[in-house]
Image (cartoon, grey):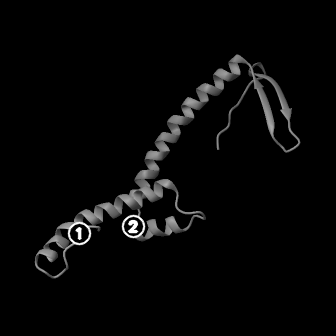
Amino acid sequence: MTTLHLTRAEVAGIQAGADGSVSIDLTVAGTRRLAEAGVRQAAILEQEGDRRAAWLRSLTNAELVDLARSRFGGPEPDVLAEATRRMREMADRLRPALAALRGAGVLEPESAGA
């Protein structure tokens, strides 16, 4: 949540809607203040995104799976991206071992479609 404080000089008019909405007409100064606040907020959100990505990387696999299952409608895109990154990393680590087992005849050769 963010708060934007506007002075009287920055507001040209306010209208309340029957559904609880509010329309605020801004002066040029108010528009400028809104734009400046937007730039600052974008920088803050970018930093938060970096922190969230670092936090997601710090979770154990079990914690990441729990987080992915906890959201109705499926995992958030950044959670899904982190899970996908981990699965690719694990597959890359397993690939040499699987190749060795196939070469030794313990596993059947990988089919062309797989």
Mark yes or no: residue 58 visible.
no
User: Image quarter for residue 12?
Assistant: top right
Q: How much space separates mark 2 and mark 1, taking CA atoms?
A: 19 Å
Query: For this rendering, which residue is in front, 89 or 112?
Result: 112
The structure residue drawn at horizontal position 29% and vertical position 65%, both measured from the top left corner, is 90
Which residue is under mark 1? 94
Residue at image mark 2: 60
Q: Is 23 or 33 nearer to us in this picture?
A: 23
Q: Quadrant of residue 35?
A: top right
Which amino acid type corresponds to the residue marked 2 in the rendered image? Thr
Secondary structure at numbered mark 2: loop
Which residue sits at x=29%, y=67%? 113
Q: Is residue 22 above or below residue 9?
A: below
Give residue 22's position: percent from left, percent from top: 80, 36
In which quadrant of the rendered image does the C terminus lie?
A: bottom left
Q: What x and y, as percent, mark residue 40? A: 55, 31
User: Dividing the image into 4 quarters, which one contains the N terminus?
Assistant: top right
Q: Position of residue 71 (x, y in %)?
A: 57, 64
Residue sitting at the far front: 112
- 99 over 32 or under it: above or below: below
Vertical comparison of 101 with 78: above or below: below
Which residue lies at the image location 16% right of the left edge and 70% below the top edge? Answer: 99
Which residue lies most toward the bottom here?
106
Could you tell me residue 49's position as x and y percent?
47, 46
The kind of residue on which mark 1 rests is Leu
Q: Is residue 58 left or right of residue 36?
A: left
Inspect this view and state whether residue 34 appears: yes
